[in-house]
Amino acid sequence: MTNIIVPAVVSLGSIGLGAAVILYFVAQKFKVIEDPRIDEVEENLPGANCGGCGYAGCRAFAETLVKGADQGDISALNCPAGGNETMANVAKILGMVAEAKDPQIAVLRCSGSRANAPQKVRYDGPQTCQFAHALSSGESGCPNGCLGLGDCVVTCLFDAMYMDEETGLPVIIEDKCVACGACVKACPRVIIELRDKGKKSKRIYVSCMNTEKGALSRKNCTVSCIGCGKCVKVCPHDAITMENNIAYIDDVKCKLCRKCVPECPTAAILELNFPPRKEKTEGEPTPAEA
Amino acid sequence: MKTFTFTLGGIHPEENKISEHSPVERLEIPGQLFVPITQHLGAPAKVLVNKGDQVKTGQLIARGEAFISANIHAPGTGKVSKIDVHPDQSGYRKTMVVIDVDETEVWEDGIDTGTSIIRSIPYAKEEIIQKIKEMGIVGLGGATFPTHVKLMIPDGKKVETLIINGVECEPYLTSDHRVMLERAEEMLVGVQILMKGLGVNRAVIGIEKNKPDAIAHLSTMAAGFPGIEVAPLMVKYPQGAEKQLIKSILNREVPSGKLPLDVGCVVSNAGTALAVYEAVQKNKPLIERVVTVTGKNVKHPCNLLVRVGTPIQALIDKAGGLPENSGKVISGGPMMGKALNTLEAPVTKGTSGILVMQQGESLRKEVQNCIRCAKCTQVCPMGLEPYLLAQEAKLEKWDMAEADKVMDCIECGSCLYTCPSGRPLLDYIRVGKSKVGNIIRTRKN
Amino acid sequence: MSLLTLSGSPHLQTDRSVRGIMFDVVIALIPALLVSMWFFGLGALKVTLVAVIACVFFEWLITKYLLKAASTVGDGSAIVTGILLAFNLPSNLPAWIIIVGALVSIGVAKMSFGGLGKNPFNPALVGRVFLLISFPVDMTSWPVPRFEGYMSLGGITDAITGPTPLALLKAEKLAELPGYVDVLLGNMGGCLGEVSAAALLLGALYMLYRKVITWHIPVSYLGAVVLFSGILWLVNPGIYVDPLFHLMTGGIMLGAFYMATDMVTSPMSKKGMLLFGFGCGILTILIRVFGAYPEGVSFAILIMNAFVPLINKYMKPKRFGEAVQNG
């Protein structure tokens, strides 16, 4: 027995020892000196690798943050997923102060639900918006409207979106959306926009991207912006502009006065998370979804 | 008779040439014509008329100013009621010139509307090219590449053969077939004009053997035209694709990323040859074309001579209306045609057929796992690996897709046709092609 | 009128389906099954039925309860796996061993990789090799076919077992080898499906006709077997048997036409298929002549399966316009 065990132990042991020595010297030689702050910063980031900051994952963002701190400026960097709290923590590690940024949220600028924009043709093929967009103007015929195949839902890392089967439109879950912008990039028609979350999540926006003339866009959808300009006139804060037959409400200038909402003849302007209006007018528009 | 075909890949879908024995009928001009200003590959033409203008049939209404562009002429007599957007065949609204057609037709001066056949060609090479350009001739096979650009051979390139594509490999379509049967002599003069324009003295007309009457008729007629021969080809899809046709007839392969010019030939469609004849000999611009209206359930499958700009609804009405259980209307053939979004869309220079499919045949098969059966690689006429390209496009591996020659794909659809798992191979490859194409363009700039 | 449909071109699709292909394979295997029943009696039917039912059942169980996905049993691939597994087993194998083999085939070799189309190795062969290594005695006691067996259906006993021709060869008992007519028809010891070369060829012709398989893999496989064994035979006919004998015996016919050609685990390009088949052939003869096992088809194909991704990477199909010819 021993004449087997001893040589085996000795030979294997010496191989192991030799390898360990080699490994030690190799590790010494190729040692990468890394700023310990990078690890520390990374630990404080959400770790979702969502890319909302514009960098390839949290690690890359942490490296950029440390580099930015060395140059004395991290104001341009922001982690939308973590929000102000995370940025404050990170800034503390780096010995800096982070500016508090207004939180943002993704907003779907289309109300072309099955009821509002009835289906005229049926799309049959791979269920991704990308293909449907390249193929034709879509099931409702609106060239700018939501195709309802959910590329945005698939791409969302935070489970903050789902398709509403009844309307055929994606729904953004407010509590979960971190405004990383992945859905904005995924949408071939760029219908989703990142907007300021607003005080108490109150938001007013034009829920339409159709650039066609009013009569044409109304052919496909009852709630499209027809570019009439009434909202522009009524806005006391100059927050609304009109370009390419669609109105756009600037989320910074908008003071959430809600004057434009009842003015819109097609109910294309949506108000979210406001208390119900007092019996003012009869034709009160109802948002497609909250 | 010895027949040829291409060697790599290919499929045999059911031919269903229902309308092959219906002679071409003229479709009356509708009340309103919608003339898109982009009916060709390349830059849109610039509109020359204004709202309210009175136009004559054949009058130039939009000029193609870019190098690759084509002139557009009024396909009817009447008043320009508006220049506005109107849905095209994809359903997207595009700029179109809308003409309210008058009762009586007045032709633009200089256009010969007689039926006598003029055989002598008194024009020089440059004059021919100029006339073809002036008359807005584009390839009528479907790609709508401006013909005059094709005839302008860059310095250093030498062309010795003109190939006329009378293959019509798409199932159902019969418009070229009817043209070859009914207008053979004019078409052959058109081929002679193209030969003169190119400066070649050999032309080969490739026709698949499922059109024996056309082969026989053209062979007899071609005897009177020196330099023109007819090549009967075996039936295989996609033989009508430019590169495959050159391989079938001349046994030359156009290398990846090159043009037929690089192997010494130019390919033109049979219908285009007829349009060239009319343009050069009769001064008649390209304002009408033969369109096959067909489908298994269509009451009167037919071949119609249609003015460009006619709403597709009018063609379907002429063929007996949209059948009850229609599921899909396709502009072009079933393999490469485009499913129509709306029947309001007008016929353009590139519309070779309108195919109405039944509900049952219009839905895609259920998609299953790829079983790696390699049928897509076996049928790919370009020798590509569709399963791999589709996967690379799905995973957004653009560099790998480029290395695997995604840009060589001719989008013939053989892979999707043959896949037993019903996988949307070509849909993904198209995405890959457009992405990789963009990457290559930005790299060049 | 209902809505028009939109989809990308092409708008035609073949009526061939995965299920159709699988049932073509099943049809192609029926002659061989009948022949094996002729020789081995109801035992052959029992083994086949147990294997098929077990394979289908395990696939259904796994998709339903483990993957919680839509069942894929309908595509018929489990039936093919079951039959091929059975064809690689002796007819007197106890049912529980067959069930273990089916579990390994479906559960380990197929479903754990993601089901049909994703498995790198041929499931039936993985099951077979697993059984061969785990139950060597049961797996190599081959019942001797008795011609009168079919007469007394069910009366066939498993009592008499005998060696396969290849086992005889391994033991260098050349004198006891059966004659060519017997091996062609299948009147020799062996697995269910390895016995009759003629019946397998018949099924293979059907598959070629239906374009389920192409000629590339079988031809290069058999070509390599003939070439390599022929060289050995010419060197020393006293020790080595002639190529024809190699072709007719063992699982080569089954392997070359039904196992190596398995779509999922074979290369995509024609060049790749030729290389794959050639590799299988060489490895088979290597194992038969120089290896420890009398038969090497299963191992040869499994080893070549492992090379398929590599072959796919480097053996691209012939591209159009690759060879610039101007003539």
Image (cartoon, coloured by chain):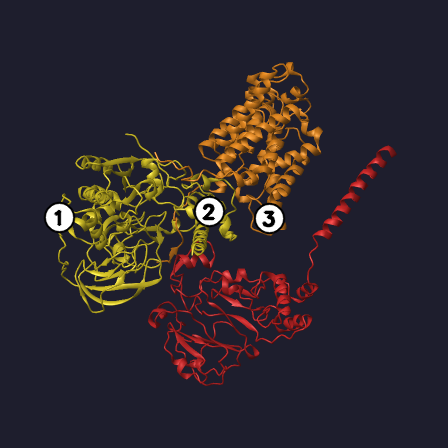
Query: Quick check: do tags 1 and 2 share a chain?
Result: yes
* Residue B330 coordinates in the image, percent (x, y): 34, 52
Please say if the residues under marks 3 and 2 sit with CB atoms less than 8 Å apart. Answer: no
Picture colour for chain B: yellow
- Residue topped by disc 2: B422
Residues A124 and A258: in front is A258
Q: Report the chain shown in orange.
A: C
Label 3 sits on a secondary structure element that is: helix
Label 1 sits on a secondary structure element that is: loop
* Residue C263 coordinates in the image, percent (x, y): 52, 38
Label 2 sits on a secondary structure element that is: loop
Residues B385 and A147: in front is B385
**Badge 2 amino acid:** Gly
Q: Report the chain shown in red.
A: A
At 43% from the left and 55% from the top, the residue drawn is: B438
Q: Is residue C325 left or right of residue B390?
A: left
Up-down: is B107 above or below C109? below
Mark carried by residue B115:
1
Task: Please give the chain letter of the residue carrying mark 1.
Answer: B
